[in-house]
């Protein structure tokens, strides 16, 4: 099932916008526990295409998503950068290759929702790295098995007939 993560901005001049489209494998019973939930966060909802079409503002967000129009997302980004009340908002910049990396000490926010978001993001990062490492290990084992077939390449799938 195809699901969308729609973000409702706290800024009054920014309309709802879709931040992700996720294809569910149908294994999870509750969409709030799947991959889309990891992307959603506190201001976003996981919805289907038919739910998006039912609401006029959400329909506009869906049309913008289909047209690859990220203007609402860009407007929200600019509004966040202009908002000085958030001490955790830091603009990104390009670092020259000769410049040594500057690592600020990790600060855990006191706000519970922000703290939860950061911890979820760190958990997703760890999970992703583990998944990539598993894939690399599997690939190495597969290549070793291929090399162990006495120089012959074995097909991944053999078709056997009764002839």
Image (cartoon, rainbow, N blue to C red):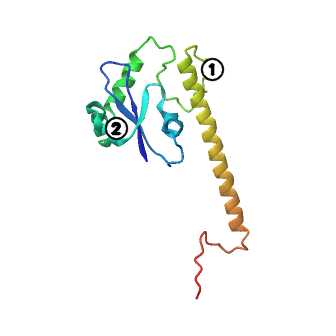
- Left or right of residue 55: residue 104: right
Q: Is residue 102 above or below residue 141?
A: above
Furthest-top residue in this view: 85
Dot 2: element: helix
Which residue was labeled with disc 2? Answer: 51
Q: Earlier in the sequence, mark 1 or mark 2?
A: 2
Quarter of the image where the C terminus is located: bottom right
Residue 36 picture location, percent across and down: 48, 38
Residue 27 picture location, percent across and down: 54, 47
Dot 1: element: loop
Name the image quarter holding residue 110.
top right
Which residue was labeled with disc 1? Answer: 106
Name the image quarter holding residue 123.
top right
Q: Is residue 128 above or below residue 44?
A: below
- Observer-nearest of 132 and 120: 120
| Residue occupying image coordinates x 33% and y 25% | 75
| Residue occupying image coordinates x 60% and y 75% | 158
Residue 93 picture location, percent across and down: 48, 26
Task: For label 1, count other residues whose C-alpha is less than 10 Å away and answer few (under 14), some (14-19) or many (20+).
Answer: few
């Amino acid at each position: 099932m195809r699901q969308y993560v729609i973000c409702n901005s706290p800024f009054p001049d920014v309309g709802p916008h879709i931040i992700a489209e996720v294809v569910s494998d149908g294994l999870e019973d509750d969409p709030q526990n799947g991959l889309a939930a990891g992307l959603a966060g506190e201001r976003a909802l996981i919805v289907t295409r038919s739910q998006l079409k039912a609401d006029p503002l959400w329909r506009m967000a869906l049309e913008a998503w289909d047209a690859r129009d990220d203007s609402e997302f860009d407007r929200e980004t600019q509004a966040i950068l202009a908002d000085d009340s958030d001490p955790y908002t830091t603009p990104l910049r390009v670092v020259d290759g000769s410049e040594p990396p500057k690592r600020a000490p990790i600060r855990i926010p006191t706000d519970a929702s922000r703290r939860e978001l950061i911890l979820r993001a760190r958990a997703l990062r760890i999970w992703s790295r583990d998944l990539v490492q598993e894939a690399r290990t599997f690939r190495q084992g597969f290549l070793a098995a291929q090399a162990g077939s006495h120089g012959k390449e074995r097909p991944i799938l053999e078709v056997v007939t009764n002839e």
